[in-house]
Amino acid sequence: MSPEAGIPHGSGTGAPPPTDSPGGVRLAVRVAELVREFDGRPVIDGLQLELQAGEFVALLGRSGCGKSTLLRVLAGLDREIRGEVWVPRRKAVAFQAPRLMPWKRVWRNVLLGLPGRPERAAAERALAEVGLDHRADAWPKTLSGGEAQRASLARALVRDPDLLLLDEPFGALDALTRIKAQRLVSEVWQERGCAVLLVTHDVEEALLLADRVLVMEDGRITSETVVDLPRPRDVADPRCAALRTRLLARLGVTDADGDGEGAADAPTEERTTVAA
């Protein structure tokens, strides 16, 4: 990542990060010693993070651990930080609430915030990508929950992002619509090849979608799980089930870990890999 390709945030030296990770892989995101405080209390405390170009990473953690704060920092929406954050210039965010303007038709919502005078055709291409081009002239109030979320995703995709940030985008959807939305995001990611960071509370969702699953606790990344399974994935797969058990233990939801030991005995900073 070069200074031209990435935007530095924070109070560090401003020197660009290495183009490649130590393993020789091109990076989309690099975070070093990130600190974000609210009223003197660190919500993010010395966090380190790297995302490879084209990688899909899910971030799990209890409420209040700093997940959404980290996503806002990466999006450039929160700059009251210490440390260094490097992200691509082209990035986009989709939130849990679609945040559509009710007085603008769907296609105009998709173009909202774009510089210059973008043409309707750009919105229609993005809407077609998420299967919503037939609703381009609709008013937001006439959309179903799933349609509104797809419109929000189209608004992110029209920016042609190198980094797509998803903050629990499926949380308000019913179970069946959620499954369809997850499949859509997976298909769009595989087609686009951009890096994705998904903030979620859903362990199964993380395992279905991500290359890596990170667990965040007290403002730090404390666990990384590599999910090297073929796509599309099935949560009934015994390998997924084993990972689910381990991740739930990491999150403190269950006592049993993947090897039968209690969660308190599970090492932190562990890199777990499940291969096909």
Image: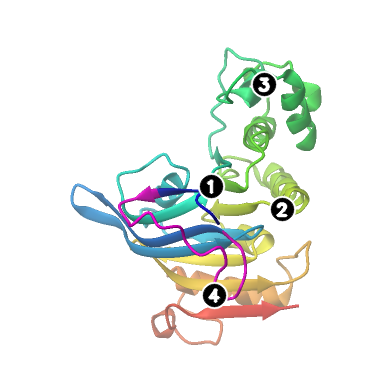
Residue 61 visible somewhere in the drawing: no
Residues at marks 1 and 2, CA–CA distance in whole angstroms: 20 Å
* Colour logic: rainbow
- For the point 74% across and 48% down, the residue is 192
What SS does tag 3 mark?
A: loop
Vertical order, 36 against 268 (above or below): above
What SS does tag 2 mark?
A: loop
| Residue 26 covered by magenta stretch | yes
Residues at marks 4 and 3, CA–CA distance in whole angstroms: 40 Å
What residue is shown with label 2? 193
Q: Are marks 1 and 2 in contact (CB under 8 Å)?
A: no
The disc placed on residue 4 is 1
Q: Which residues are magenta?
A: 9-27
**Residue 149 point in image, percent of width and height:** 64, 35
| Residue 143 covered by magenta stretch | no
What residue is shown with label 4? 22
